[in-house]
C-alpha cells in the first residue's frame, strides 16, 4: 500500500532554497550511498575548448560571494545562457568556457505522503534519514564558479553573457576581469616577456614557465 501511494503522489522538485546553505558534511556518491540521480550538468567545457593559448588572452571569471550550495540544475542553466549568448553574438569559435566547480554533494529528501489515509501509511519522523534527491556543488566565498577566455575584442559580450548567468544562481555573484593571460597562471606582461625569451613551455590550452634552477630531471623542457 505504501509503495502504491508513493507512486500515486509524484511530487515536483523541491525548491533550491531548501538546500541553499551548507549545514552538513559532504555526502558523496559511493558504494554506501547508492541510487543517486545523475547531475543535470554533464558538459564542463564549451566553445572552442582546444583553442591555442595564444588565441584567447582575455579571461573573465564568475566568482561566488557566499558560502552556499549551487545545484547542478542552476549550473547547467548558467552554462546554457553563456553558450547561447556567445554563439549568437560572437560565433561558436570565439570563446572557451569552463565550469570550475563540480556537483559532488548528494542532497537527501524525506518523502512525506499527502494523500488521503497517509497517516496510517507513513511513519512520520521515525527513520527520517532521506533518500538521494539531487546533486549540488559546495562553494566558498571568493571561489571561481566559471571562467570564460576569449579575444580582447569580445570583452563586452563576455561580461554581458556572465551577467546573465548570475541570475541563475542564488546569492551574490561577482564578475572579475583577470589580469592573467587566458587560463594560465602568468600575468599578461610576464607571459609576453617569457614568450619572447623562449621561457615558456606551451601545452595547448595552457602554458608553464620553464624553471631555471633545481634538479635537472625536474626542469620542464
Image (spheres, rainbow, N blue to C red):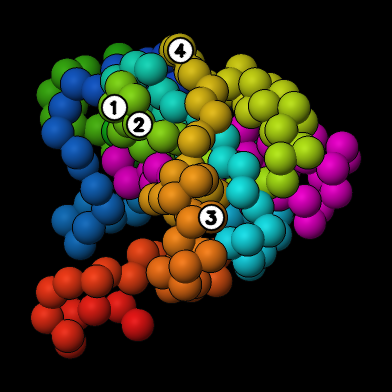
State the separation of the CA atoms marked 1 and 3: 33 Å
Where residue 111 sits in the image (x, y, percent)? 35, 27
Mark before the other along the chain sequence, 3 or 2: 2
Task: Look at 41% across and 34% down and name the residue there.
Answer: 144
Mark before the other along the chain sequence, 3 or 4: 4
**Residue bounds of the magenta highlight:** 78-105
Judging by the rendered image, the residue that carries numbered circle 3 is 192
Label 3 SS: helix
Label 4 SS: loop
Judging by the rendered image, the residue that carries numbered circle 4 is 172
State the separation of the CA atoms marked 1 and 4: 12 Å
Residue occupying the far bottom of the picture: 217
Do labels 3 and 4 touch, CB within 8 Å? Answer: no
Residue occupying the far front of the picture: 197
Whether 95 is among the magenta residues is: yes
Judging by the rendered image, the residue that carries numbered circle 1 is 140
Judging by the rendered image, the residue that carries numbered circle 2 is 143
Whether 82 is among the magenta residues is: yes
Question: Which quadrant holds the C terminus?
Answer: bottom left
User: Which of the pair 117/74 is nearer the observer?
Assistant: 74
Do labels 1 and 4 touch, CB within 8 Å? Answer: no
Where residue 165 sits in the image (x, y, percent)? 63, 26
Q: Which of marks 1 and 3 is in front?
A: 3
Task: Look at 21% across and 42% down and name the residue there.
Answer: 27
Amino acid at each position: 500500500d505504501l509503495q502504491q501511494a508513493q507512486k500515486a503522489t509524484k511530487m515536483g522538485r523541491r525548491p533550491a532554497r531548501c538546500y541553499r546553505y551548507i549545514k552538513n558534511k559532504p555526502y558523496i556518491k559511493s558504494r554506501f550511498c547508492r541510487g543517486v540521480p545523475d547531475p543535470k550538468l554533464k558538459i564542463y567545457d564549451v566553445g572552442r575548448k582546444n583553442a591555442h593559448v595564444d588565441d584567447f588572452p582575455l579571461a573573465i571569471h564568475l566568482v561566488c560571494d557566499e558560502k552556499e550550495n549551487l545545484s547542478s540544475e542552476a549550473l547547467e542553466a548558467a552554462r546554457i545562457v553563456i553558450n547561447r549568448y556567445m554563439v549568437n553574438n560572437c560565433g561558436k569559435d570565439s570563446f572557451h568556457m569552463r565550469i570550475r566547480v563540480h556537483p559532488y554533494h548528494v542532497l537527501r529528501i524525506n518523502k512525506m505522503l499527502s494523500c488521503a489515509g497517509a497517516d496510517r501509511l507513513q511513519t512520520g519522523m521515525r527513520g527520517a534519514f532521506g533518500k538521494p534527491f539531487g546533486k549540488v556543488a559546495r562553494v566558498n566565498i571568493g571561489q571561481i564558479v566559471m571562467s570564460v577566455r576569449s579575444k580582447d575584442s569580445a570583452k563586452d559580450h563576455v561580461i554581458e553573457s556572465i551577467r546573465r548567468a548570475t541570475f541563475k544562481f542564488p546569492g551574490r555573484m561577482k564578475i572579475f576581469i583577470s589580469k592573467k593571460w587566458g587560463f594560465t597562471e602568468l600575468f599578461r606582461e610576464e607571459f609576453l616577456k617569457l614568450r619572447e625569451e623562449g621561457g615558456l613551455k606551451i601545452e595547448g590550452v595552457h602554458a608553464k614557465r620553464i624553471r631555471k634552477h633545481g634538479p635537472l630531471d625536474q626542469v620542464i623542457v
